[in-house]
Amino acid sequence: TRKGVQAYVLYLVCCSNLFAFDHVGLTHESHKKDVEQVYLRCSEGSIEWMYPTGALIVNLRPNTSPASYKHLTVCIKPFKDSAGANIYLEKTGELKLLVRDGDRSPSKVYCFGYDQGGLFIEATPQQDISRKITGFQYELMNKGIASDLHTVSAPCRPCSDTEVLLAVCTSDFVIRGSIQDVTNQAEEQESIIHVGVNKLYRQKSKVFQLTGESGNWRGQIKTLLECGVKPGDGDFLFTGRMHFGEARLGCAPRFKDFQRMYKEAKDKGLNPCEIGPD
């Protein structure tokens, strides 16, 4: 773009579809206070704002009844190299800073109740915006699911029998497998569990796949570093949810313990759902 003239491009990924909006020939000086609005009806997606100037209001309008909005939580995960704008939570004209421009907290996720407000993204003053891209992924989910993923009280405690049986029915993935290896990421305060799958009960995304070399099912699950997961012998029942395209660990009892609790609940007619425990 020639000197004194700027362009910005906005990429929106919604329901796996890519939309691009470009504004070319806008002088940076005269349009730096412009405010644009976008409306998104998908429950998950991403926004990538290239050459940010002015401000952007993101209105999330999921295809659900407005009466259910109060039960929703919004989570955003900034891209690793996101820069050029501050991201605020806005309600009735009041702004609360969520993500400061230049914050490099790796893999950090910011969540808030849908009824707490919308997203207001404001470009920060820059001498050269041509290299700046502000972007993040977003997800809308039920408040119960969000609290499971981002609980701060005893996040590594073992699940009770009732919690395990419920997780089997409601999780995005349920597998029987063993821990092949664990990769610790100190900077992100996370651990990646490399899992060998012996039986796949359910998965919503193709996280666990057949490997070409051995013909075995394998996959990766993330959890908090503080949980201290280590490789070991024996099978586990791994359950959990998908979050920003990654499998996050939920309940994971030893498989023999799951067999016991499943049989006890079945004998009493208390199983919330049926699953073959063998």
Image: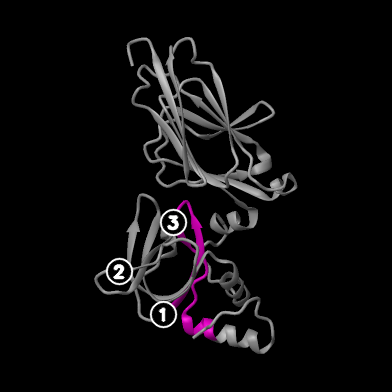
Residue type, mark 3 in image? Glu
Residue 197 seen by the camera: yes
In-front residue for pair 233/175: 175
Outermost bottom residue: 267
Q: Name the quadrant of the N terminus.
A: top left
**Which residue is rendered at x = 69% and y = 87% of the image?**
268
- Quick check: 70 above or below 203? above
- Quick check: 192 above or below 267? above
Q: In this image, 42 relative to 81: left or right? A: right
Q: How far apart are the alpha carbons under marks 2 and 1?
A: 19 Å
In-front residue for pair 210/186: 210
Specify whether residue 244 is painted magenta: yes
Q: Which residue is mark 2?
A: 211
Q: How far apart are the alpha carbons under marks 3 and 2?
A: 18 Å
Residue type, mark 2 in image? Thr
Residue 138 seen by the camera: no
Q: Which residue is mark 1?
A: 235
Q: Colour scheme of this structure image?
A: one colour
Helix, strand or loop status at disc 3 = strand
Q: Which residue is mark 3?
A: 246
Counting other residues with Cα less than 10 Å from the Cα at mark 1, is it few (<14), some (14-19), or many (20 or more)? some
> Residue 3: where, in percent of width, then height?
33, 10
Are the residues at dot 2 and dot 1 in contact (C-beta closer than 8 Å)? no
- Which residues are the magenta region? 235-259
> Residue 205: where, in percent of width, then height?
46, 61
Q: Nearer the viewer, mark 2 or mark 1?
A: 2
Q: Earlier in the sequence, mark 2 or mark 1?
A: 2
Quadrant of res 222: bottom left
**Which residue is rendered at x = 60% and y = 57% of the image?**
145
- Quick check: 82 above or below 32? below
Quadrant of res 232: bottom left
